[in-house]
């Protein structure tokens, strides 16, 4: 029996604010147990609540031995992380950094 499976990909919304936090948390809970890629290509604004959801999920995935990473982060997404005091290198796929 083959236990390998492709990582689930969740497309992040353009605006990750308080209203988006509940939906994002639900999508992450549904994907729990396997590797997950968060596609940040459409993100225009990242708020603290969604950042908390992402950081909590990242810690949970790491604790459970799975991978959760941000792929294709938009310029606005990277800028928002930095503005909120978060090093993008800790969350974004290595190929996202030039």
Image (tube, rainbow, N blue to C red):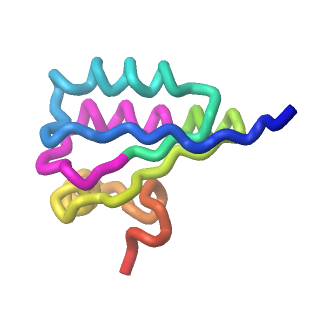
> How many marks do you count on the picture?
0
Is 63 on the left or on the right of 51, as rendered?
right
Residue range in magenta is: 39-57
Report if residue 43 lies within the magenta region. Answer: yes
* Front position in the image: 47 or 71: 71
Percent position of residue 88, x then y: 38, 61
User: In the rendered image, which quarter contains the C terminus?
Assistant: bottom left
Percent position of residue 63, x then y: 67, 36
User: In the rendered image, which quarter contains the N terminus?
Assistant: top right
Is 1 on the left or on the right of 12, as rendered?
right
Report if residue 33 lies within the magenta region. Answer: no
To which quarter of the image does residue 49 belong? top left
Q: Is residue 53 above or below residue 96?
A: above
* Front position in the image: 5 or 83: 5
To which quarter of the image does residue 66 belong? top right
To which quarter of the image does residue 28 belong? top left
Percent position of residue 87, x then y: 38, 61
- Residue located 48% across and 58% down the image: 90
- Residue located 19% across and 36% down the image: 16
- Residue located 56% across and 43% down the image: 7
- Residue located 23% across and 60% down the image: 74
From this viewpoint, which residue is outermost toward the right?
1
């Amino acid at each position: 029996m083959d236990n390998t499976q492709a990582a689930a990909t969740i497309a992040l919304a353009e605006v990750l604010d308080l209203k988006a936090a509940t939906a994002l948390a639900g999508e992450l809970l549904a994907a729990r147990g396997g590797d997950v890629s968060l596609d940040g290509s459409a993100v225009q604004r990242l708020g603290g609540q969604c950042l908390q959801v992402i950081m909590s999920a990242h810690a949970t995935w790491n604790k459970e031995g799975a991978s959760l990473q941000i792929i294709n982060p938009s310029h606005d997404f990277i800028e928002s992380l930095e503005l909120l005091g978060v090093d993008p290198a800790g969350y974004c796929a290595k190929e996202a950094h030039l």
